[in-house]
Amino acid sequence: MKKDEFVFRLKQLAPSREDYHRLNFSDDSITELIKRFECNPLNNDLFNSIKNDEILELLNTYDCSKVEIGLLNLNKTVLEFPNYYLIGKIDSDIIALNKITLEIETLDHEGRNHLLWSCAASSKRFLNSILTAAEFFSRRIKDPGLANNKVFTNEYVLNCTDKAGGKKYIDFYKMLLGNFD
């Protein structure tokens, strides 16, 4: 998935103000919740030389720091380390682009050399799979009856896993979508 398509489709997934009102959220809270589906253009030349990786281009072109998909947050800026680019967080752990394999991985915040989960085979696959996860959370807000529907959750886990590149990534999406069976 290309960065601009991700930004456009993510914004379209945002639940409406009415959806949030039905769940008794305040107007101020609703404004902040809707921003979790928005990436705003920015002027950043930090990684301008990297044009062949979609997640780095996304974070170089847009401020996605308010994006929240479950426990997953994207960074405002990319941080470079010897073996990876730090692109976001999941709870307190690190979402990183591995410089060697080009996979997206979750690394332990205490021991950055400790791999917790493999997330996706590539940046494009990662964007596609987390967009699907965003759809999952959006649908649960629009239809609160889906919150405890295990079949619904499992279908999305499998769909995200497929889009990420296969079964190797299933544990990450089980954790992200809260499928603990």
Image: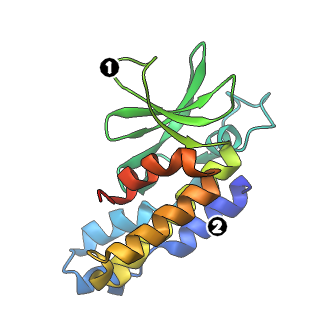
- Residue 41 seen in render: no
- Residue 47 seen in render: yes
The residue depicted at 69 percent of the width and 22 percent of the height is: 100
Q: Please name the residue that numbered disc 1 is placed on.
A: 110
The residue depicted at 64 percent of the width and 60 percent of the height is: 6
Residue 74's place in the image compared with 78, above or below, is below
Circle 2: residue type: Phe
The residue depicted at 62 percent of the width and 60 percent of the height is: 7
| Image x and y of residue 58, in percent | 66, 46
Q: Foreground residue, 69 or 12?
A: 69
Q: Earlier in the sequence, mark 1 or mark 2?
A: 2
Crowding at dot 1, Cα within 10 Å, few <14 / some 14-19 / many 20+, comes out as few
Q: Foreground residue, 139 or 7?
A: 139
Q: Please name the residue that numbered disc 2 is placed on.
A: 8
Crowding at dot 2, Cα within 10 Å, few <14 / some 14-19 / many 20+, comes out as few
Residue 106's place in the image compared with 132, above or below, is above
The residue depicted at 37 percent of the width and 33 percent of the height is: 93
| Circle number at residue 163 | none
Judge left or right: residue 74 versus residue 142.
right
Q: Determine whether the residue tagged by mark 2 lies in a helix, strand or loop.
A: helix
